[in-house]
Amino acid sequence: MENEKYLNDISEIKNLMNKSSRFISLSGLSGILAGIYALVGALLAYKTVSLDISNFDLNISETAIIRLLIIASSVLGLSIVTGILLSISKAKKSNENIWNTASKRLVINFMIPLATGGFFIIFLIEKNIFGLIAPLTLIFYGLACVNASKYTLGDVRYLGITMIILGILSTWFIGYGLLFWALGFGVCHILYGSLMYFKYERK
């Protein structure tokens, strides 16, 4: 009985340490919805531009670029708002504080690679180098996920690695960048979000 009590105490201490060092209120449902937003955005982007897959050039007008930026910003904004709202809801159900040391570390470590990639992509847009935008968004987002994964659920690390691989692969198929973008931000988010939902949230 004493040994069992000690084991239970050790398990409880381990859980408390894990909660204090990791933000575990990420919502799998928000990942699913982010994937849906991305697929809708990819469809709208496909209708906005015509991809010339016979060479490495993308014939995009200035008007189309503005529309693409609006679509991308809308997808990103909806994903962030949805993620925050659903994570707050999950944290309340678990009686956890949404803004703690772990969540702060998560945000900081996620934003460093993401902001770096964002500035680099803005530079590419300014120089009219559009072919590498889709691969680099996948790669830098993947790096952000891997970098932040040590402060949240471990599954995020595998999502990040998947994104990096897709981004690298898409550099060999520049004309199919939008397809890889939809596969990464759309399909992968839905798959990983579903996995996290059924693994951690569904009772």
Image (tube, grey):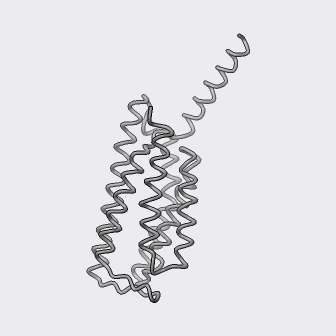
Where residue 186 appears, as percent x and y from the top left, is 41, 60
Q: Quadrant of residue 147?
A: bottom right
Quick check: 143 left or right of 62? right
Residue at image position (41%, 35%) is 91
Please state which of residues 98 and 67 is positioned toward the viewer in this rendering: 67
Residue at image position (30%, 67%) is 71
Q: Residue furthest right?
A: 3
Q: Is residue 123 above or below residue 156?
A: below
Where residue 119 appears, as percent x and y from the top left, is 45, 70
Where residue 161 appears, as percent x and y from the top left, is 58, 59
Quick check: 135 left or right of 58? right
Looking at the rendered image, the quarter that the C terminus falls into is top left
Q: Quadrant of residue 14?
A: top right
Q: Is residue 167 above or below residue 153?
A: below
Residue at image position (71%, 10%) is 1
Please state which of residues 126 and 140 is positioned toward the viewer in this rendering: 140
Q: Quadrant of residue 94?
A: top left
Q: Is residue 86 above or below residue 121?
A: above
Where residue 193 appears, as percent x and y from the top left, is 45, 49
Q: How many marks?
A: 0
Q: Is residue 10 above or below residue 87?
A: above
Residue at image position (36%, 62%) is 39
